[in-house]
Every structure is written in structure tokens, then in C-alpha cells.
Amino acid sequence: MENNKKVFYILLAPVLLWLVFLIIVPHIELLISSFKPNSGDGFTLENYSAFFADKIYWKTFINTTLYAIGVTLLAFVVSFPIAFYLTKVVSRKYASFLTLLLLIPLWIGELVTIYGWVTLLGDNGVINESLKFIGLIDKPLPLLYNNISMTIGLLYMSMLFMIVPIMTTLESLDDAMIEAASDLGASKWTIFRRIVIPHSMPGIINGSIIVFMLVIGDYVAPNILGGKSSLWFTEQIYNQFLSTFNWSQGAAFGFLLLGISSITIWMALRLSGQKLDKVGE
Amino acid sequence: MSSNILEIKNLSKYFDNFTALKDVNISVKEGEFISILGPSGCGKTTLLRIIAGFLQESEGDVLIEGKSMKGIPPEKRPVNIVFQSLALFPMMNVYENVAFGLKRQKLPKAEIKKSVLDMLSRVGLQGYESKQINELSGGQKQRVAIARSLVMKPSILLLDEPLSALDRKLREHMKVELKELQKEIGTTFIYITHDQSEALVMSDRVAVINKGLIEQLDTPHNLYNNPKTGFVAGFVGENNRFEVASRDGQKVVTKHGWQITKPDLDFEPTLMYIRPEAFIVDPDESMKGVEVFEADITTILFDGANTKMLVKPEGKDEILIALPQNAKFQALKQGDRVKVAVAHENIKCYKE
Amino acid sequence: MIRSLPNSTGYKYGFRVYVALFFIFLLLPLIAVSALAFNDSSAITLPWKGFTLDWFFANTDDRVGLFADEGLLTSIWISIQTAFAMALLSTIFGTIASLLFDKFNFRGKGLLYFFAIAPLVIPGVILGISILLASTAVGGEIESIFGVDAEIFSPGFWLVVIGQFSFGATYAMLLVSARLKKFDHALEEAALSLKATGLQSIWYITIPFLKPAIIGAFVVTFLMSFSNFNTTIFLVGSDPTLPVDLYSRIKFSSTPVLNAVSFMIVLSVSIFAFINLIINRNKK
């Protein structure tokens, strides 16, 4: 439609409004703020030098990144069999019901589900009390407020974002291809390695990118379920903005977080040869 | 000013480095049924979309009723399209589909109703107003699509292969129906197709397009009997195609070594075409102006009244020959040697 | 290994056990949190001390049930209003964006599309703080130039809506685009050929076709807003949304009234999900 200039501008205007004022300008402001002193005007590198000067900042930063990558891998390992089962193994009668069940925690939201884990894992929580009841333990196990409970929380709130894109790609895998491979004498392991995994690669990459972003940017799970030693970099940002009110320092931390997550995602896209456009599908 | 309803003048269209149409000229008289015939990718759909205003020409001009259409958007042109996919609006019923265009013109409700009902009865769909689109058969959908366009009283109706989605039987039927409808209402039809039989059966004239160029614009009869180019000869109707290696006086020698006499040639041909039905099997000795040769039957392709056979004259060429199913030829079988004649005028030679 | 192939018993049952464990993992916190809403105890934990509806209806000195808890009811109401406004804005802008990117080619389209899907990979906390910083800067400018306090630029209801909308529109756009891909563009051309204007053809043909996706986008963005914490926390004013309220209560003062709220959310989402399932079944 080469002729419809009017329609074009009517559609373009609101989109520009959204992207310029809510995406582009705020991120430029984030960058500018990170070079401002805490009070007054001017240009300073102190917000960044503070980051490198204090071990707790950069160590937390590196740990958070590595931990987020680890949780992403864990989410893949846990999710892939589920995605495969729901698309290819379970009878179609139950597939849509189970898929729906899968999505319910997603819509319930992070706060409620994390709170659910608190009631499960606490000293007098459901799990400890049940173990006590059947006589396996007499003192409660320290299940809550440590790295394991934090990992459970992070995995729980993010894994559905791994399962769904993998299911989408698996649905487009023709069953006949698996049948043909099996007919030609391939073992299950070979079929997974040579056919199923390569076919679902775009979904795996999409899922990993979203999971990584959610995990590295999460606050609720580390803050509520984590222990004294489970430091998460987002907590530093929250502290700067909501407790110590040093927004410039917080902006610098925010920019570093945005930087590391963008770089990691970019590398994942590069290594897999995928485009960012496809992440949304 | 000419009295032509549509005038396409020196029209060219380029997409980046690709030439979709090159210097196309077509004049269409009011009430004519014109087909644009060509293989897929030849530029015929581009031509239609330029006439409709969905694409802009790179060079040249389109005049409708004598008025240049430069810069005029599709909704302001006196043409309507019947789309290949029909593009019936699935969220509306038959009545709403046909009334859609009239409603956009803000005509009074009563007038819209009258026109729509009148048009539906003309295409034989009275009583179908409140039917949903998915409740209709293929042929009925076809008629709704045509009614929806015709109710707009366009100067020209553009049809983009509207029969291609139908099965063969229905297509044969709709060909006849479409032609009769056009005769009855008298609107100018421009019909895009890759099916030469549709073009030949329905049209007053046919433009054959290949690689963006008009090869020949002519009546179906001339197109079939006097193709101007090798492409037309090969594309319109069934044909035997021979690559010519050389000419030896009046003798044309094919690449595979068959020789046949074609008198009065004044150029060096590279291609030769002879239609299967141009051959006369077991001719009378008395026939004049014909070339007679002998050949071995390699295969009989039995297909009722359309039965043909493949024969081999000297050399490696195989020739397809129509074989009328009368008592005389029923005994012919593979391996027989037959005498075949062909009139000189039916041997078509081209230089490409 | 798939439905149509014979499987060994080990494979079949091994797989089933794994899937069962997974679904227990998935549903256990929801079941636990819901069940404890009916525990006759002031602690959010076991032991089970009997069934009560106190955490929904009581209004005494030591037990305030959900329907007597002004604070919680207010934050739920604020969340509903926020989610409605955010979903409406996101759906409208997302639909417009998907039409723009689908129908037109223009210079800078790739870059613009990049920005449109960027919120998918930007952590919510970053969107929160950058919108906070930008709106504070703009609000400050307006105050120093015009001497008025531009309330919309300071943390509060509308800033939360705007902040959530910045990524909500992305999800709405992607949901609508998915359906738009199945749209037969000849339908729009047919409308133009029938003398509809460009806008009319979008309004009468494209939008009705997109209706299921637009409704879907509204529901999805509504739920996203209703459960959002990471972006909201930075933009919220003196009236917290439900997730923000829940967070501070979990951190500082948890009573089983939180379980009551959680139970209500679990219940409504489940009911909604199953209605959805039944509708989809009937469509097939």
C-alpha cells in the first residue's frame, strides 16, 4: 500500500510517543543520572568507581550473573522433559488440561507463589511439620533463608517461560520425523540429540534469554527466600533507591545490570545465530 | 479522446533491480472481456495491481475512461477487484459483504438494500442474504465475490484468477457462467489467469504476457492458429516443439536430425512448432501443400476422444499426434509404421 | 518415545513419575498457601489447629480478616484500577504498533521495532528506575519553569500505570501480531477496492478479525499488571498496589490474612483458566 500516507502517520504517532518517551528517553536519563553526583549537578565517575572500590558490590554483581546463568541451565534441564511430554507423549485428551495447569502459577503472580514457598519451607512450615509428624526428624531442617530456597524460588517463577517457547517449537516438529528416525534404527538418545533438540533450539534460546533476564532482574525471590549470604545485585539497586536515596549510585548499578544482561543476551543470540526479533514469538 | 474505457500506455514497473513489466500497451473497449494470460511470475498480477491502484507504475500511465489514474488511490478508482482468494469478509454475512462498498458511500439504507437484493438475484443467490460465508459452497462464494464487486457498478471489473481455487468440474461450469454473466451485464472484464483454456473460452481478446512483456494481444482464434512468437505457440494450447539446428534450402533440420520441408522461409529459424491436431494420419495421396513422412508408433496414449500417440520419424525426435477414435485408427498399435502428413501452413517457425 | 510409537515400560513410567513430581512441585505452594488460609491459628504455619473462616471475615483485636482489612481491600482496588488502565492503554498501543509494523515499510523500521521489543529483555527493575528518573527530571523541570507541581510525574497511580504500560504494550503487540500474521491481506485490499478508506478498512475488516487477539492481549496485560512488583515498587506513591502491599506484609507482619488473599487469587485465576479451557474445547 504505497498510497496510504495518512494511515501511516496515524499509526506511527502513538508508537513514537510510546517508544520515545517511555523507552528511549528514560534509558538515556538512566545513563546520564549514573554520571551525576548524589547531590547537585556536574559530571562524575564516582558512582562507577564506588562499584569497583567496594568488593561487596562487584562480587555480588559477578555472583548474581553466574548464578543467573546457572539457574537458566537448571530451568532448561527441568523444563525440557516436561515440554516434550506435554507436546509429544501425553495423550491429547490431557495435554490442554495439563498445559493450563502449568500456566496457572504464572498468572497468580510471583508474590503469592513465593509466599507459598515461605509457608512450605519455614521452620514450622508444611514440609518440616510433615516430616516431624511421620517421625523422620525431631528438629526442623533449615530449609528457608538459604541459597537452596532462593534457587527454588527463582526456578519456580521463571521455568514456565522456558517450557512455553520450547513447547511452541516442539509442536511444529512433525511426529513423522521422529517415526522415520526410529524406523531407521536410531536410539532414543540419538533422536533427542540429533532431531528433537536441534529442532527446538530456537525455543530453547528464547526461553533461556527470558529466564536469564527474569532471574538476574528478580528481587522478590532472593529478598524473601534468600538468606543473609544470598546477596543479589538487584538488592543493591533497591537499597540505593528506596533506603539510602542515592539515586545516582542506583542509576549506575542499574546501568551495569542492564549492561551485563544485554551483553549476555547478545552473546546467546550471537552463538545461536538467532535474531532478537524471534524472541517475542 | 479515444472511446477506450481503459488505456495502458508505455507502462513499466521496476522493483529494485527487477523489471516486472516492460513497456506494456493495451487498449480496451467498453464491454470487452479481456484476459491477461501468462505463467506465474510473468507480471500479470503486478499489472492488475497497478490498474487497481495498489501499486504505482514506474513509467507510463493508466487511463480509465480517458482520465489519468496517476496518484489516485484505489478507493477513488472506478474499478473493483474479484480476488484470487475471493477475500470475502468472514465476519460478515452475504448481505453485509455485498453491501459493504455501498455503505462506505453513505447511500440511503433503502437504496443499498434494493441494489444488494437486485444484484444477489442476478447472480442467482436470492434468499442467501443472511447466510454466513462459511456456509456457502465454492461456486456460491464465487458469485458473492462477483456480486460484491458488480454492485459498485465499476467501469472495469478486475478478476484475479478467481476460479483457481475451485475443483476442475466446477471450474469448467463457472467459465461458462462467468462469460454469460459478463455478456448480460455488459461491464468490461479484465481477467487475469495462467490457465489458457479459461482465457480462450471466455475472452474477446487475450494478452499473453511473458517476463513483463506483452507477446501478443489478439483474439483467441488468432492466438491459437497464428501465434506470433515461439512463446505464445508453446504456451497457448498443446504443441510439439522442435529446436532447429539448421536450414538447408527449403528443408528445416531439427537438432535431433528430423528433416521437414517448409517453403517460403525468409529467415533462419531456431524453433519450430506443429500442433498435434495438425497432423493427418494415413493421408490421401491427392492432398496438396502438405509434407508427408513415415514414422514408427512408440506409444499410444489412450484417453477416449482425446487419444494421442507418440511417433518417431527419422532422427531422435518424438512427435505427439492427435488420434481421432474412429474405426479407421483403432487398430493402430505400438510398433506400427504409419504415414503422416502436415500442411505447410501449419508448420510454424520462429527465430528467438 | 512419542504417542504413535511403542514405548518400553521403563520409559513410560519413568517419564510419568517425573512429570507427576514436577506438577507436585508446581502446585504444592499454591495448595499449601490456600489451605492455611483456613487454619485457626495466628501463625502462617502448621500445626493445623482447626478450620476457621476468621481470616476472611473476622474483625477483632487480634484477628482481622480479608474483608475487614481496609488496607488490603484498598490495595486490591488500586491494583484492579491500575490493571484496567494499563491493560487498556497497552492493548490500544500494542494493536496500533502491530498494525504499523505489519503494514508499512519505512526508514528506521528495524530500529523502531528493536525498541518496541526491547522491554522483553530489559529487567523490570531497570524500566522502573529509568522511568522514575526520567519523570522526576521532567517533573522537576516543569516545576522550576512553571512553578507548578506536576503530580502525574511524581510517584503515584498514573506513574505506575505508565511504567507498566511501557512493557505491557510490547506483550500486547506480540500477541496481536501473532494473529495478524494469519490475516489475509487481500481482505483489506478488497475493502479498499470497494471504496473504503484506509482507516475504514482497518476499522471494519482488520480490527474485527483481530478481536480475539485483542481481547487476549487485554487479559494478559491485565494479569501482568495485577501481579507486577519489580517495576511498580519504584513508581508507587502512598497507595500501594496489592503486590507491593503483600511484599511489605510478608517481610514485616505476616498473618494468615495473606493466605486468605492468596487463596482468593488462586481461586479466581483457576476459575478463569477453566472457563477459558471449556470455551476453547467447545470451539473445537
Image (tube, coloured by chain):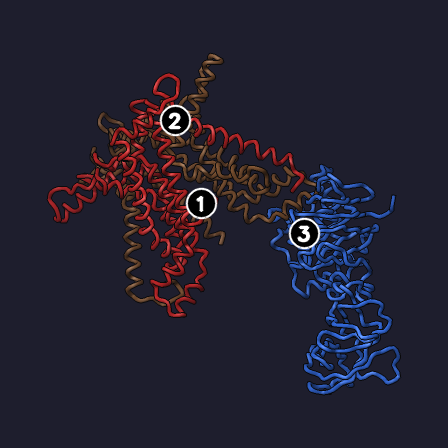
Chain colours: A red, B blue, C brown
Foreground label between 3 and 1: 1
What residue sits 27% from the left and 39% below the top?
A63
Type of the residue with mark 3: Phe
Q: Which residue is mark 1?
A: A279
Nearer to us in this view, B350 or C151: B350
In the rendered image, residue B214, in percent from the top left (x then y), is placed at: 76, 56
Where's the C terminus of chain B, which quadrant?
bottom right
Q: Which residue is mark 2?
A: C235
- Residue C222 sits above or below residue A270 on the image: above
Type of the residue with mark 2: Leu
Q: Chain of mark 2?
A: C
What is the crowding at mark 1: few (fewer than 14 residues within 10 Å), some, or many (at least 20)?
many
What is the crowding at mark 3: few (fewer than 14 residues within 10 Å), some, or many (at least 20)?
many
Foreground label between 2 and 1: 1
Q: Which residue is mark 3?
A: B83
Tell me if label 3 and label 2 are in contact, CB under 8 Å: no
In the rendered image, residue A240, in percent from the top left (x then y), is placed at: 31, 26
Q: Chain of mark 1?
A: A
